Amino acid sequence: MLKILGRVSSINVRKVLWCCEELGLGYEREDWGAGFRSTQEPEFLTLNPNAQVPVLVDDGFVLWESNSILRYLANAHGGEWLYPADPQRRARIDQWMDWQATDFNGAWSYVFPALMRNTPPNPDPQRLAAGIDAWGRCIATLDRRLEETGAYVAGQDFSLADIPMALSVHRWRETPVPHGPTPVLDGYFERLAVRAGFRLYCSSNTP
């Protein structure tokens, strides 16, 4: 039985839970992180010295970093349809997963905590404006990509890359920043809405 350590309110934990839903995997989950057991406890730090959730434990194998966990689960538990072995198809998925983890997440790293978590309580207006602008540029990049494929971020088929991407878009949609008309992203979410994992972990009010 897989064990997942982390609170459901964490966007990175929800990536892993959605992936398990896609793969039909059973698991046990323990609440760790803000509002629950502290990730600074020695028991947790032994598993992840970075004190971050999620952590996956699979029959004694311990792994952290959410996108790495997604790749591992697909590789280890029959998920080639999500993460194909073909080098070019896999590289395209990796490209967008890496972009999501770096450029996309980096764009909201100041804006989201300031507007949604009141951290810092008195945000710097210039940093806030710069972050909102960077976040908007990332959304525009993704919008162009989805318009190009007419389907999903890595191509015509739903893939592992759509899990972190959709959660990041959901976070943007739930944050009070300028949005404007988003017909392409709206269509993307309509396609994703047929998936149980999306309905469970990406259509709630938890950004």
Image (spheres, rainbow, N blue to C red):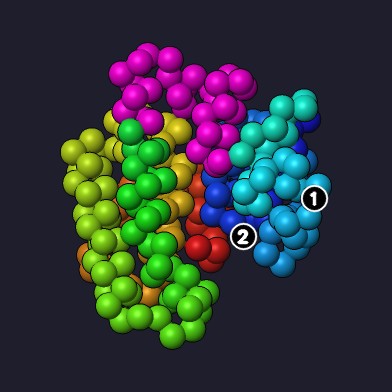
Q: Residue 16's x, y, as percent? A: 59, 41
Answer left or right for 64 relative to 185: right
Magenta-drawn stretch, dominant element (helix, strand or loop): helix
Q: Amino acid at mark 1?
A: Pro
Mark 2 surroundings within 10 Å by alpha-carbon count, few (fewer than 14), some (14 through 19), many (20 or more): some
Q: Residue 140's x, y, as percent? A: 21, 54
Residue 192 or residue 130, whichever sits in front: 130
Label 2 and label 1: CA atoms lie apart by 23 Å
Q: Could you tell me which secondary element the residue under label 2 belongs to?
A: loop
Which of discs 2 and 1 lies nearer the camera? The answer is 1
Answer left or right for 175 relative to 152: right
Say whether disc 2 or disc 1 marks the residue closer to the N-terminus.
2
Mark 1 surroundings within 10 Å by alpha-carbon count, few (fewer than 14), some (14 through 19), many (20 or more): few
Q: Is residue 78 magenta?
A: yes
Q: Residue furthest top?
A: 86
Q: To which residue does mark 2 refer?
A: 9
Q: Residue at x 27, y 55 (%)?
A: 139
Q: Amino acid at mark 2?
A: Ser
Where residue 42 is drawn, which disc sits there? 1
